[in-house]
Image (cartoon, helix red, strand yellow):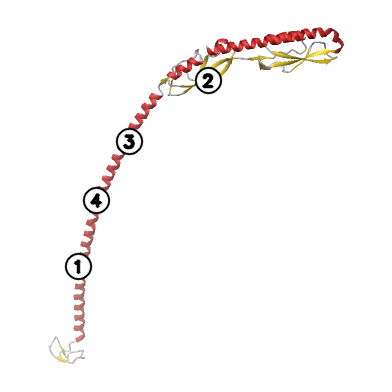
């Protein structure tokens, strides 16, 4: 049964209009549906508001927690930076201390004054350098001055300069120059040639060669070329022409020349021995 809301008349269930006043029942249903929709919308709004409130609360709580984390992170980073700063300060202080110690040690080592040993004998110079805690080495140089034999004539570092401990000082020591220049004797007579060689302190050996083209008793060859420097102990061989046409005249001369050559060689050997003894005495002094 449908009761008319307007006149309160009972009507059948399938009636669309009231039989008494003609009220249209579907309008009321629409109104009910509208009311139901409104109520449901209100409920949805209330639910949405509560959800939003809950969300905002959650967001606020979540927003609060990062602030605490950020504060803690800032504290941790500040402590870490302070530790690093302290470490670098201590490290720099340690490096400065080490550098100062090494610098002082380097200054002490490189503050040795080099003594002047020029003019001293090599033995005296080495004693002086040993006293100054310096090392040394010898370099020989030839000299014609007898006063410079065995004497320090030069040193690698000047006297009065500064150097480090055990620095090597090169001492230049003079030794006697035993070299002589070979003269040109080809074309000379045997007597002239031997006299020239004796003046230049050159030892020699005589050989004869039979020939008809060269003048008898003249020098036709020498084993070492003219102008070359040799040691005074080296022997030069000179070749003398023997003219077969004048054998009878030259036999006596040859024997005499041989005797003089032997005497000259003996004299040269004696002079060499005496000069060597003089050198040894100078070196010992």
Residue 50 is labelled as 1
How crowded pointer 3 is (Cα within 10 Å; few <14, some 14-19, many 20+) is rated as few
- Secondary element at tag 3: helix
What residue is shown at x 20% (from left), y 75% (from top)? Answer: 40
CB under 8 Å between callouts 2 and 3? no
Q: Is residue 201 above or below residue 62?
A: above
Using the image as rendered, state which of residue 43 and residue 268 is in the foreground. 268
Q: CA distance from mark 1 to mark 2?
A: 106 Å
Task: Please give the residue where the numbered disc 4 appears in the rendered image.
Answer: 72
| Mark 2 or mark 3, whichever is nearer to me | 2
Residue 138 is labelled as 2
How crowded pointer 1 is (Cα within 10 Å; few <14, some 14-19, many 20+) is rated as few
- Secondary element at tag 4: helix
CB under 8 Å between callouts 1 and 2? no
Q: Is residue 254 above or below residue 168?
A: above
Q: Position of residue 141 (x, y in %)?
A: 57, 17
Q: CA distance from mark 3 to mark 1?
A: 63 Å
The quadrant in which residue 93 appears is: top left
Question: Which comes sooner in the sequence, label 3 or label 1?
Answer: 1
What residue is shown at x 34% (from left), y 34% (from top)? Answer: 95
Question: Which comes sooner in the sequence, label 1 or label 4?
Answer: 1
Question: Which comes sooner in the sequence, label 2 or label 3?
Answer: 3
Q: CA distance from mark 2 to mark 3?
A: 47 Å
| Mark 3 or mark 1, whichever is nearer to me | 3
Q: CA distance from mark 4 to mark 2?
A: 75 Å
Q: CA distance from mark 3 to mark 4?
A: 30 Å
């Amino acid at each position: 049964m449908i009761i008319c809301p307007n006149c309160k008349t009972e009507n059948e269930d399938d009636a669309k209009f009231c039989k008494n006043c003609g009220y249209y029942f579907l309008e009321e249903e629409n109104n009910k549906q509208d009311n139901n929709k409104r109520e449901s919308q209100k409920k949805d709004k209330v639910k949405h508001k509560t959800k939003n409130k809950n969300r905002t609360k959650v967001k606020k709580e979540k927003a609060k927690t990062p602030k605490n984390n950020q504060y803690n992170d800032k504290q941790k980073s500040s402590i870490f930076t302070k530790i690093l700063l302290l470490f670098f300060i201590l490290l720099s202080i340690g490096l400065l201390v080490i550098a100062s110690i090494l610098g002082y040690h380097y200054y002490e080592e490189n503050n040795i004054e080099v003594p002047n040993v020029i003019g001293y004998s090599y033995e005296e110079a080495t004693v002086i350098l040993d006293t100054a805690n310096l090392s040394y080495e010898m370099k020989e140089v030839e000299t014609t001055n007898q006063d410079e034999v065995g004497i320090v004539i030069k040193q690698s570092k000047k006297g009065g300069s500064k150097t480090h401990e055990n620095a090597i000082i090169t001492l230049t020591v003079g030794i006697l120059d035993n070299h002589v220049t070979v003269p040109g004797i080809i074309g000379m007579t045997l007597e002239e040639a031997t006299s020239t060689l004796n003046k230049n302190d050159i030892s020699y050996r005589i050989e004869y060669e039979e020939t008809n083209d060269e003048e008898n008793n003249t020098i036709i060859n020498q084993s070492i070329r003219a102008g070359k420097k040799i040691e005074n102990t080296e022997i030069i061989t000179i070749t003398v022409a023997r003219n077969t046409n004048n054998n009878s005249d030259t036999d006596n001369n040859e024997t005499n020349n041989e005797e003089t050559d032997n005497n000259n060689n003996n004299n040269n050997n004696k002079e060499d021995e005496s000069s060597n003894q003089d050198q040894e005495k100078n070196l010992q002094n």
